Image (spheres, rainbow, N blue to C red):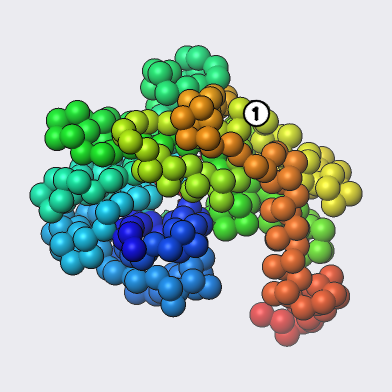
């Protein structure tokens, strides 16, 4: 039985990757940081099959200790401060964790067992300013946020440990990938959740930032398969994973609202609060290397993705709010109108 360690197992990708590896028969160790409140929502359905261990990419000794204790053959480094706007307000922490954290894990591997295969979660945010489209493995980086800059460091330190110490380190340059497990602050889930709330009478507007930014959006479950494939090759290498299609935030909004027969113009408010100090205007990836060498292809297209996320949000909100939710919301509004309502 092979053993894999996943950092960031409580995140979107970590949860899908853990499911995928368990199905393949792996012993899966999930590293979580210590928090005062447990945050296992995305992994609670597989928690009894996982081994959870506390560790932190900020703490070198915890990483060495985990590798010594569990002896994984594969390490997937998915933990990061992954929200771009937060990287502008917390640039130093983002660098400590998203950049230097990668070096700490690579050092732990070098010290404990240099034969461990290592996956680094690199990002299309590294491309940033448009230099070439579609973006591929050879496209120069010009990151546009402290997050993007930190990921460029993580990318190059992985390449460096491969070249310096022969470590089997792969960097997956993944374009945006989404799912019903996506954090609610990211634009796709913010939109589908907002649409579902409006459809169910729980909200009457959706506030967004820049609608013109274009992204290459895929489905997260497809992308974790690509991560695993990278570590099964004879030689380590870097790969772009993307759909090759680009859509604007506006197109995502239109598709999500029209799917539930609503006109987005009646509900969407553009709010400068959600604009970024520097924006990445256009991302579209060329995943032909991954197609050719790994046999990797995405299975979910843009429309399917939007619809599956709207459907999941509608179902979750209906369950959480009872049925019919509109009725419950109306009752709450009536209660709030009472003079003694707080
Ligand atoms: P999430 O934000 O959903 O998950 C991030 C994980 O990292 C969580 O388990 C979280 O733990 C942990 N984490 C976040 N901040 C910290 C911190 N300061 N200290 C310790 N742990 C922390 O990200 P995704 O699953 O979407 O992405 C996985 C990786 O892939 C990330 O590295 C991301 O940058 C990268 N990536 C993602 C893409 C995408 O489109 N999703 C595309 C390209 C790269 P906790 O639950 O405790 O917060
Ligand atoms: P991104 O994802 O920055 O591409 O990073 P996000 O969904 O946050 O933004 C995508 C685009 O939408 C625009 N936008 C808004 N974004 C948010 N979050 N909220 C809004 O209200 C809003 N309105 C418009 C943004 O300006 C941006 O152009 C994600 C993360 O998962 C990273 O960790 C990962 O590396 C990259 O994808 C690839």
Task: State the residue at coordinates (83%, 47%).
Answer: 259
Residue at which label 1 appears? 245
Is 7 left, or right, of 178 in this rendering?
A: left
Observer able to see residue 196:
yes
Label 1 element class: loop
Q: Residue furthest right?
A: 261
Which quadrant of the figure contains the C terminus? Answer: bottom right
Which quadrant of the figure contains the N terminus? Answer: bottom left
Circle 1 packing at 10 Å, graded few (<14), some (14-19), many (20+), is: some
62 over 79 or under it: above or below = below
Is 320 left, or right, of 278 in this rendering?
A: right
Task: State the residue at coordinates (72%, 53%).
Answer: 308
165 over 75 or under it: above or below = above
Residue 180 coordinates in the image, percent (x, y):
62, 57
Q: Residue furthest bottom?
A: 340
Count every numbered label the image shows and give the total: 1
Residue 144 coordinates in the image, percent (x, y):
42, 28
Residue 194 coordinates in the image, percent (x, y):
71, 54
Task: State the residue at coordinates (53%, 35%).
Answer: 295
Observer able to see residue 333:
no
Can you tell which quarter of the image residue 84 is in? Answer: top left
Q: Nearer the viewer, residue 339 or 94?
A: 94
Is 265 left, or right, of 148 in this rendering?
A: right
Can you tell which quarter of the image residue 134 is in? Answer: top right
Residue 245 coordinates in the image, percent (x, y):
65, 28
Is 280 left, or right, of 1 in this rendering?
A: right
Can you tell which quarter of the image residue 337 is in? Answer: bottom right
């Amino acid at each position: 039985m092979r053993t894999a360690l996943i950092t960031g197992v409580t995140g979107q990708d970590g949860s899908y990757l853990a499911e995928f590896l368990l199905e393949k028969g792996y012993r899966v160790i999930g590293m979580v940081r210590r928090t005062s409140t447990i945050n296992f929502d995305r992994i609670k359905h597989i928690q009894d099959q996982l081994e959870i261990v506390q560790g932190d990419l900020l703490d070198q000794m915890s990483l060495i200790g985990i590798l010594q204790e569990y002896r994984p053959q594969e390490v997937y480094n998915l933990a990061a401060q992954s929200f771009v706007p937060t990287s502008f307000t917390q640039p130093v922490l983002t660098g400590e964790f998203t950049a230097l954290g990668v070096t700490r894990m690579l050092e732990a591997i070098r010290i404990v067992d240099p034969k461990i295969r290592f996956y680094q979660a690199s990002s299309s945010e590294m491309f940033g300013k448009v230099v070439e489209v579609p973006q591929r493995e050879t496209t120069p980086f010009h990151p546009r946020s402290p997050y993007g800059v930190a990921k460029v460091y993580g990318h190059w330190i992985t390449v460096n440990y491969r070249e310096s110490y022969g470590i089997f380190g792969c960097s997956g340059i993944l374009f945006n990938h989404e799912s019903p497990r996506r954090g609610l602050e990211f634009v796709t889930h913010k939109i589908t959740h907002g649409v579902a709330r409006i459809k169910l009478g729980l909200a009457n507007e959706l506030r967004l930032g820049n609608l013109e930014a274009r992204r290459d959006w895929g489905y997260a479950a497809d992308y974790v398969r690509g991560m695993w494939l990278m570590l099964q090759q004879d030689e380590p290498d870097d790969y772009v994973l993307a759909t090759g299609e680009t859509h604007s935030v506006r197109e995502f909004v239109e598709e999500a609202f029209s799917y539930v027969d609503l006109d987005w113009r009646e509900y969407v408010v553009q709010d400068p609060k959600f604009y970024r100090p520097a924006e990445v205007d256009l991302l579209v990836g060329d995943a032909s290397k991954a197609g050719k060498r790994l046999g990797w292809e995405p299975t979910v297209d843009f429309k399917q993705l939007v619809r599956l996320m709207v459907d999941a949000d509608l179902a979750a909100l209906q369950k959480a709010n009872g049925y019919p939710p509109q009725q419950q919301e109306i009752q709450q509004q009536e209660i709030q109108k009472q003079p003694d309502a707080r």
